[in-house]
Each structure stands twice: as C-alpha cells, then as structure tokens.
Image (tube, helix red, strand yellow):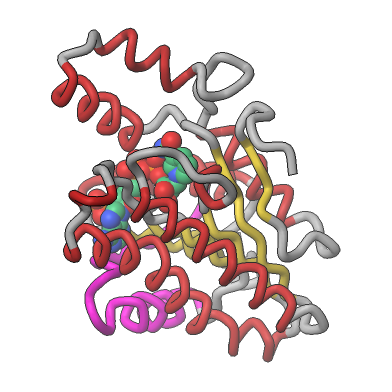
Amino acid sequence: MSEESPVALITGAGRGIGAAIAQSLSASGHRVVLTARSTEELEAVAASLPGEAICIAADLTDSGAVDRVFAAAEDAFGRIDVLVANAGAAMSAPVHKTTDADWARMLDLNLTAPFRCIRRAVPGMKERGYGRIVVIASAAAKRGEPLIAAYTASKHGVLGLVRSVAAELAQTGITVNAICPGYVDTPMTDGSIANVVAHTGRDAAAVRAYFANQQPTGRLITVAEVATAVQFCLDSPSVSGQGIEVDGGAVQS
Ligand code: NAP
C-alpha cells in the first residue's frame, strides 16, 4: 500500500453494511477512513482489514462534524477519492405519532449528513478529475411502505440528491450513485425485528421470516451483496445518477 493507493472514506463503518464495504474496499487496495460514533467498533473493524486504515469517531449530525472528519482524513491520507455515505438509522411509527424530533433525526442523519459529505468531497475530486460517490439509500428510496414515513422521506430525498449531483458533475470524472437495498442481515434489521416483537408480542423467528419474505428471493440480503454493488459503482465510469436495487428483485425499475 502506497501514497498512490486510492483513499475511501466510509461513514457508518463500525458494523453492518459499512463494515462489509470497508472490508471489500480494503481488499481491493484502498486506504480506508472509517467513521462512526463508536470508537471501539471502528477499531475492531480496522484491526480486521488487510490494508491501511484510520478511525475517526464522530456523530455526523453534530454541527461541524463532517468538516472535522474530512480534515482529519486529508491530514492522514492527503485526499479522498471514494466517498461511501452509508451511516444511517431507521425508525418506525404511524405518521400521526411521528414527532418533530423523530422527523428531524431521520432527515439529519439520512439526508443532511450525506449532503454535507458530498459537498465537502466534491471540490477535491473535481480538482483531481476523478471521484466515486456512493450513498447507501434503501428500497424505501423508491417506494412507500407503511409505518416508516420519516425514514422513507429521508431516503427518497437522498436519492434525489444523488440524481441531481450526478447530473451536475457529469463531465468532471466523478460518478454519483445510490444503492437501494431491501432488508439486509445487519444489527439495524435485528433492531427492527426486536421492535416489532416488543410492540406486537409476535415470535422473533416469525418476524425475521416476514422480513426475509419482503424479498422475492425469500431471504435477507447479505452485507457482502451490498458491498459488491458498491464495487460495481467504483468500476463503472459510465454508471451515474442511478439508484441500484439490491433487493432480490422486489422493485423493478
Ligand atoms: P447498522 O448496522 O445500524 O450500522 C449503522 C452504522 O452507522 C454504524 O456504524 C453506526 O455507528 C453508524 N451511525 C449511526 N448513527 C450515526 C451518527 N449519528 N453519526 C455517525 N455514524 C452513525 O445499519 P446498517 O443496516 O448497516 O445500515 C447502513 C445503511 O444502510 C443505513 O443508511 C441504512 O439506512 C441503509 N439500509 C439498511 C438496510 C437494512 O435492512 N439493514 C436496508 C436498506 C438500507 P454508531 O452507532 O457507532 O455511530
């Protein structure tokens, strides 16, 4: 690994999809910058990678956090060639019980933080005439499902952001895409299952099977499958402005 190796910044890299993307990009020769709130989780991921990595703990919804993370990353590695805006959270509530705080929490993390990351990443990428930006959106970026209005609005919003920025940057060497997974086997999905169990008293295995059956394939998506789609975006200079479904064929678009 040398100063010539490309640099990838991955948000939400401490577990789940972000940790798998870090593995995949490290294995394909990237120096990686891992960020999330939990230092312990980040360090465990960094220790498991084949290549060079640094960890920067930050709550991306704090004011100034995105600028601090990018400054520390550039101090360490000099530049950012690849941005994977993956950090996100979900919540479930009927729309009439969704509070202003719930709404703000979903939009701040799932929409505003990716916007700030993209805004901060683009000038350096433009200067170098190369960049890859991938946002981990959701199947909820393309269709509405009950009881997740704030999450769905944030993910539709982030896909709009991706499409507009891709159009704006078409002649710069930078591509901008979103990955739109169905239900993925991660701690977030474990949390969603636990939430349904707590509210309905249903059996956890039955709820997990219900989530698995939201994919026509009848199973949860794996984190490695999402990481493969990210790698596809990195390898594909003519793919930009897309919301790429990784959902077992649920949404055909
Ligand atoms: P996860 O297992 O809960 O991991 C989320 C990651 O984001 C963690 O590293 C977490 O670390 C970080 N994070 C959360 N809040 C943060 C904050 N305020 N500031 C900085 N980092 C923060 O979730 P996942 O399932 O891997 O999901 C990753 C992305 O995929 C999300 O955008 C999610 O919406 C999307 N997605 C997930 C699924 C699914 O079924 N799991 C489906 C479609 C889309 P800390 O808590 O330590 O900060």
- Above or below, comparing residue 232 to residue 195 in the picture: below
Q: At x 18% / y 19%, what residue is drawn? A: 200
Q: Position of residue 36 (x, y in %)?
A: 30, 58
Does the segment drawn in magenta span residue 52?
yes
Q: Position of residue 45 (x, y in %)?
A: 36, 44
- Above or below, comparing residue 191 to residue 80 in the picture: above
Depth check, front residue: 51 or 231: 231
Q: Position of residue 12 (x, y in %)?
A: 37, 54
- Asked which quadrant contains residue 24, the reply is top right
State which region is magenta: 49-77
- Asked which quadrant contains residue 80, the reply is bottom right
The image quadrant where one finds the N terminus is bottom right
Q: Note whether residue 50 is visible.
A: no
Q: Note whether residue 56 is visible.
A: yes
Q: At x 85% / y 63%, what residue is drawn? A: 238
Depth check, front residue: 248 or 127: 248
**Count of numbered circles in the view:** 0
Depth check, front residue: 127 or 204: 204
Q: At x 61% / y 68%, what residue is drawn? A: 162
Q: Position of residue 231 (x, y in %)?
A: 68, 48
Q: On the picture, is 248 further left or further right than 59? A: right
Q: On the picture, is 163 further left or further right than 187? A: right
- Above or below, comparing residue 49 to residue 242 in the picture: above
As drawn, which residue projects farthest toward the right? 238
Q: At x 49% / y 48%, what residue is drawn? A: 22
- Above or below, comparing residue 58 to residue 171 in the picture: above
Does the segment drawn in magenta span residue 63?
yes
The image quadrant where one finds the C terminus is top right
As drawn, which residue projects farthest toward the front? 96
